[in-house]
Image (cartoon, rainbow, N blue to C red):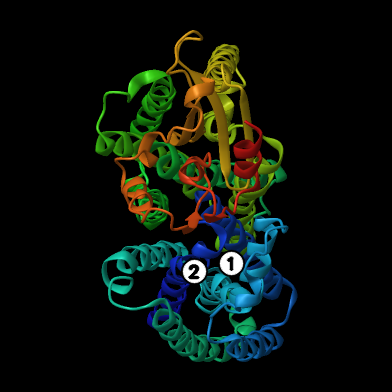
Amino acid sequence: MLFYALTIFLSSFLLFQVQPIIAKIILPWFGGSAAVWNACMLFFQAALLGGYTYAHLLFERVPAKRGAQIHIALLGASLLALPILPNASWKPQGSENPALLILGLLAVTIGLPYFLLSTTGPLLQAWYARNHAGAVPYRLFALSNGASLLALLSYPTLVEPRLDVQTQAWAWSGAFAVFAVLCALVAWRSRGGERMTEQTEEAPPAPAWTLRLLWIGLATAPSILLLTVTTHLTQDVAAIPFLWIVPLVLYLLTFILCFETTKLYWRWFYIALSVAALAMVAWFQVDGHSGMSLQKSIAGYAAAMFACSMVCHGELASLKPHPRYLTSFYVSLSVGGALGGLIVGLLAPTYFDAYYEFPLGWVFAALLGAAAMVYRYQDFFSTMRGFAVSIVLVALLGGYAGWWVHIQQNQISGYRHVQRNFYGMLRIQDEGDFTDKSRVRQLLNGVINHGQQFLHPFRRKEATTYYCAESGAGQAILTRKEGVSQKVGVIGLGSGTLVSYGRKGDDYHLYEINPMVIHFAEGE
């Protein structure tokens, strides 16, 4: 088992170490918004789905010897993709869909290595179960998540402060080559495993489609929560470097706790905790954290996501099938993760004009938690008493969803414009009395004021907020010799306030990656 464990540990470590490495390289290319990370997560989850599906088909449909040969060949081919340094030709030129460009960039740069790393967990667990009669391989899944957690924690504390991104990419590529050799050896040793399966007991019937749908749903809800809570924290609560690691660490921790042993998932304790968490985050959206410190707000959202993810992953772990159906179970988990990434990373920015996926995640988590209870206690819910309880559950879920709709509508009402694209949601609002000379029009991105302009005709060209004459930018521009023109480069347009300092003969160049910001700055 040690050889299998070492290979799975290294693959999971590399799988999650490459995520911040590649994201750090391409983040400046695409404007540094939370949506860049969500697009990366969509790729990672889709590649994970592809890897798990490949592992399932290779194990179920291909003879052991041929399967080992195919996997070894792919491992060899993946070495041709090293080192994992993206080509500068993938930098956006301004007219492309950023999400699709990121997906293409990642597929070309790390596609095959990442794909093979993602296959390792389920494939090696399946090989181990096949070659060792009566073995229960699910603890290897907890080990893989532990390695992923170590990779995430070591990056901001050990790797990122000490190595530049070029060195990081080369070091990761070297470690991947070591993994490829280890995995090839495991595959070669497992090629004769079919003889072992003849000695094993007959497996129980295949899981029903209703159970498979429940697996997918229980994996989808935490995936949506992970991405939406990350976006909310980094955009609406605090712009803190590496804050995105906190939700991801907690997400992985729930997998570790739930799949290491069933004793660490205390069902009714976490259900009660998640109910309190669902109420807390709804209250936060009204004005619950207006007077709270950043630390308490971050801790509140993180704890709520952890509680709900524990319920979903705890129920997943309790519903895991016989090892004979291990790979199909992991495919269902990856389908759920990919669905969450697809909803948050691609569909929501395209079809929602506000962050409706944030409440959707909490409502969906509540729904799936209730569905898991109904499935687990089918005998009770088939009685009249159980039917009455189910009616109450439906009413509570409907009321909770309705409350979120009400909150979300209040958050986008009263603005001149609310629009959304890949880079985020922008709002235009007017503040101040209509007869007051201090009435302003503001451009908001999340909770951040990206500039405002006085509406009074005589004050429209006054510099405001952190672009005023006393600000660093204001002082720098105003330090000019009389009669000498200036050449000024502005990175990030905002509402275009800095242009108000321009004088005849000056040459201003403004750089903005978000076309919606340009639209509002010019039109409002």
Please tell me which residue is depicted at 64% across the width and 82% down the height of the picture: 194
Q: Quadrant of the N terminus?
A: bottom left
- Residue at the (60%, 83%) spot, across then down: 193
Mark 1 crowdedness (10 Å alpha carbons): few <14, some 14-19, many ≥20: few
Q: Quadrant of residue 110?
A: bottom right
What residue sits 34% from the left and 40% below the top?
469
In the rendered structure, which amino acid carries the disc numbered 2?
Gly
Circle 2 is placed at which residue position? 134
Give residue 323's position: percent from left, percent from top.
Answer: 55, 63
Q: Is residue 416 above or below residue 361?
A: above
x%, y% of residue 440? 48, 23
Residue 379 percent coordinates (x, y)? 57, 26
Quarter of the picture holding the C terminus? top right
Q: Which is more N-terminal, label 1 or label 2?
A: 2
Give the residue type that dot 1 points to.
Glu
Residue 146 seen anywhere in this rendered image of the structure: yes
Q: Nearer the viewer, residue 432 or 513?
A: 432
Tell whether 382 sits left or right of 301: right
Which quadrant would residue 364 be assigned to in this image? top right
Q: Secondary structure at mark 1?
A: loop
Query: What residue is shown with label 1?
Result: 201
Q: Secondary structure at mark 2?
A: loop
Q: Residue furthest front?
A: 483
Q: Report the Cα–Cα distance between label 2 and label 1.
A: 8 Å
Does residue 186 appear to the left or right of 271 in the view shown? right
Q: Residue 37: image x %, image y %? A: 52, 56
Q: Is residue 440 left or right of residue 476?
A: right
Residue 455 in view:
no
